[in-house]
Amino acid sequence: MTTNYIFPSDDILEAGIDESNRGGLIGEVVSACVVLKKPTTDYDIDIYNQIKDSKKLTKKKRQFLSNYIKENALTYGIASASLSEINDINILKATLKAMHRATDIAYKKNKFDKILIDGPYYNGYIPSGEESEIIPHTCINKGDSLYTCIAAASILAKEQHTQNIIDLVNENKELEKYDLLNNQGYGTKKHLYAIKEYGITKWHRKNYKCCQ
């Protein structure tokens, strides 16, 4: 039970942001932004105690929590930066673009007061279409292991990335030899061997050293 996680409160609406597939070798990078309601029932508290870093969850549990978050969050947004953006501007800048897009989607549905980001990088967010100051934000090392809202964002981002990989392989059977359904695009031994054996595809990130 993740009782060390910091739950949302009534005092301030905090949005959690995390990404998925920043370290992958193939495809787009995905980000999610989530604002959770303060849990008010024993059931909600129990579910919140199950929300943690997506890497620590089973596939079944992650899918269940993803559906719960989408149904019960005060607001959320999921967005990506494309492969071409990653190749053109580098993965860090592309990740920040994806984060801003997810933030914008969530904010337009329900405004919030502060942003908490997993990791060391984030460009300040100013809501579009209105005269507004930058929304306060804090970058937190291993934030997905500290804040429930960031952990929730990690779950949504991971689920979206997983679905992206499934769709990509289903639509392009030649990708099966890269073992993507198992490695999710990351540089596992099998994936790197396949790159060496068959070369890269048009979906690989060409500015990554192992893909050159």
Image (tube, rainbow, N blue to C red):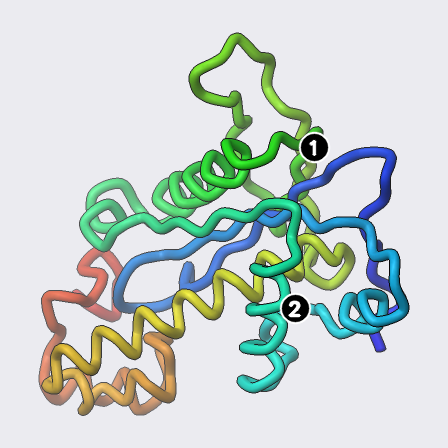
Quadrant of the image containing the N terminus: bottom right
Residue 168, position as x, y percentages in the image: 21, 74
Q: Residue at x 53, y 27 (%)?
A: 125
**Residue 114: which numbered mark, if any?**
1
Q: Residue at x 74, y 58 (%)?
A: 148
Residue 52, position as x, y percentages in the image: 70, 69
Q: Residue at x 10, y 79 (%)?
A: 199
Element type at mark 1? strand
In-front residue for pair 82/197: 82
Q: Tell whether label 2 touches label 1 (CB within 8 Å).
A: no
Q: How many numbered marks have been drawn onto this rendered protein structure?
A: 2
Residue 23, quarter of picture = bottom left
Would you call the spot at circle 1 few (<14 residues within 10 Å), some (14-19), or many (20 or more)? some
Name the kind of residue labelled 1 in the image. Lys
Q: Residue at x 62, y 51 (%)?
A: 118
Determine whether, in the image, residue 83 is placed left or right of residue 155.
Answer: left
State whether residue 141 is above or below residue 129. below
**Residue 77: which numbered mark, if any?**
none
Determine whether, in the image, residue 205 is placed left or right of residue 187.
Answer: left
Element type at mark 2? loop
In-front residue for pair 195/111: 111
Closer to the chain start, of discs 1 and 2, is: 2
**Residue 53: which numbered mark, if any?**
2
In-front residue for pair 6/89: 6
Residue 31, position as x, y percentages in the image: 46, 52
Name the kind of residue labelled 2 in the image. Asp
Q: CA distance from mark 1 to mark 2?
A: 20 Å
Quadrant of the image containing the C terminus: bottom left
